[in-house]
Amino acid sequence: MQRRTKVKQWKAVVLLLVIGMCSLLLWGCSVKSEALVNRLVVPLDSDLKTFNPVLVQDAYSGIAIGYTLTGLISENPITNEVEPELAEKWEFQQDGKQLIFTMRPDLKWSDGQPLTVDDVLFTYQDILFNEKIPSGSRDVLRIGKLQTLPKVEKLDDRRISFFLSEPFAPALRTIGGTGILPKHIFAATIKEDPNDKDKKLKFLETWNLSTPVNQLVASGAYIIQEYRPSERLIYKPNPYYWKKGKPYIEKFVMQIVESPDTALLRFRSGDLDMYRLRGEDYQLLKRFEARDRYKIFNAGPSTGESFIMFNLNKGKNPKTNESFVEPIKSKWFNDVNFRRAIAHALNREAMITNLSRGLAQNQDSPISIPSPYFLSPEKGLKVYDYQPEKSKEILLKAGYKYDQQQQLLDAQGNLVRFTLLAPAGGRVLLGAQIKNDLEKIGMKIDFNPVDFRIISDKLDNSKQWDATILGFTGGAEPNSAINLWATDGDSHLFNKGPVGDEKPFIGREVADWEKKIHDLMISGAQELDETKRKAIYAEYQQLVQEQLPLIHLTIPLYLVAVRDRVDNVQTSALAGSTGVTGALWNVESLKLKS
């Protein structure tokens, strides 16, 4: 009896241990489940270059920072309406020449410091308008032919005024949408470093990728909790975000996945909650949409543009006296008939069918298709349909000729041969087709896919290149592209002039049509009447299509797959076509189902 009692006692102890272990396992499972429920994981197509929002030159750094900083207003990409953000209201005075924002009371940065009018004043006067700090935002804010900047004045503790030299239609969206920076962090960085012989500002080295993330300050829905280069970014809610009770999602993760094929595999395995589709992905993902519990959203044509661009710069390097483009080639590239022949030789339907699996459409304009200012071909926009025989006809009339091997020669008997650059990766197949299309009309193309940094260096620094395939992101407001079309703009890449301390380029010419496009962009920004403004931008689009400094190609549909557990998703191409950003514009309002 005593032995049986002991056996029973041991059985009881073992049973309690098993129950305890199971309880722990179940508790662990519940914790894991809860963590998964409260975590949203999305891909980021490339690693960051900086945490400093003013120094951003790539889309991906801008995306990553965009969830942490906000401006005075925001734009709803579904309604296209301007909505209050850090400012609770705004008003125009003095016939549209003065814009006054009234900020919300009791705003705070993520470190608990007050966020005030002084931060706004500092952001503009000391950072964005500081010529020692390179910033594309500064050019977008320039007004009229005189290219003046707004005068900023603090009216009182909650109101700030922007005085414009003339009416400026993009003022509200451009000024109000710019991210505000914390003065208490950056004020000490705009003084010259006495130990730096080049007298560079400390600001240029502030908030770089070596900065500990706990030193980054936010005003938006999230703050960065962790950053692992080439791996991931982890965000957590900003405890002082002005929208009380938001965001709903406890942990927001951006996995850096530079290979689309890898991103696809990770989405299908359940590691990612969202995935931006390529044309070749659609049929596969559509087949398993119901089984794997996700939905594919189609937001229509993406924003932005894809194009071939020729180097039209006739100038010489002032240091070496060497032409940026070989004179023989420069003569071809600057011949509008040459560019028109190229435009008619490109088989865009094949690009759509073969490269995008039918999930794309022609992009014939420098303005994004979803923009209300886009001029469609149905409303008169000039287009170049695929007619290789017409290309040959244009070239022959312009003095070109063909040899016995049907190779294209110019009037002096030079073989028409040039190098076409493209970023290695997604544009390689596109470049291969373009090479094939142009060789059908007798041109010899040396196609060279390279790292984008090499192309960027040629465009910005050496200026020595023939032609390249590129793409720009876009949006609703045409004036956001002023830096591309201003004849002295930093992004006037097809005929770039000297920037900063560079000496004038001997021989550089600015064509009358370039000046006209610049004038139209200025006029469009000056015009407050929407009907008249659309007419100005229609003329601008026609002129670009007539002269073809950019030969437009195709633009994909914005398709993004989102898991069913993500609630309140509203996709919009206008919210951003880079990666899955078009499904994350309202990230603070997204919820995750259990």
Image (cartoon, rainbow, N blue to C red):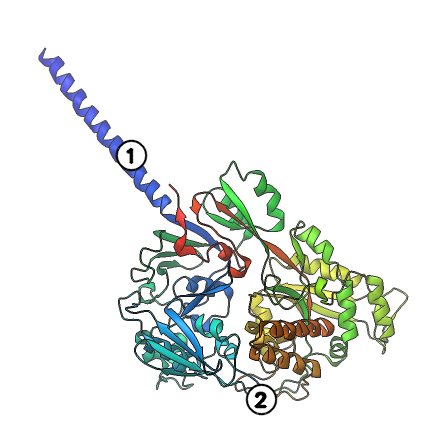
Residue 99: quarter of image:
bottom left
Asked if residue 235 is positioned above or below residue 286 in the image, the reply reads below
Residue 106 in sight from this viewpoint: yes
Asked if residue 425 is positioned above or below residue 141 in the image, the reply reads above
Residue 390: quarter of image:
bottom right
Q: Which residue lies furthest to the right in this view?
A: 404
In x, y percent, where is residue 162?
Answer: 43, 81
CA–CA distance in space, label 1 to label 2: 71 Å
Direction from residue 35 to residue 417 in the image, left or right: right
The residue identified by callout 1 is 26
Direction from residue 435 to residue 581 in the image, left or right: left
The residue identified by callout 2 is 503
Name the element at disc 2: loop
Circle 1 Cα neighbour tier, 10 Å, few/some/many (<14 / 14–19 / ≥20): few
In x, y percent, where is residue 69?
Answer: 39, 66
Residue 466 in sight from this viewpoint: no
Q: Which of 309 and 176 is in front in this view?
A: 176
Name the element at disc 1: helix
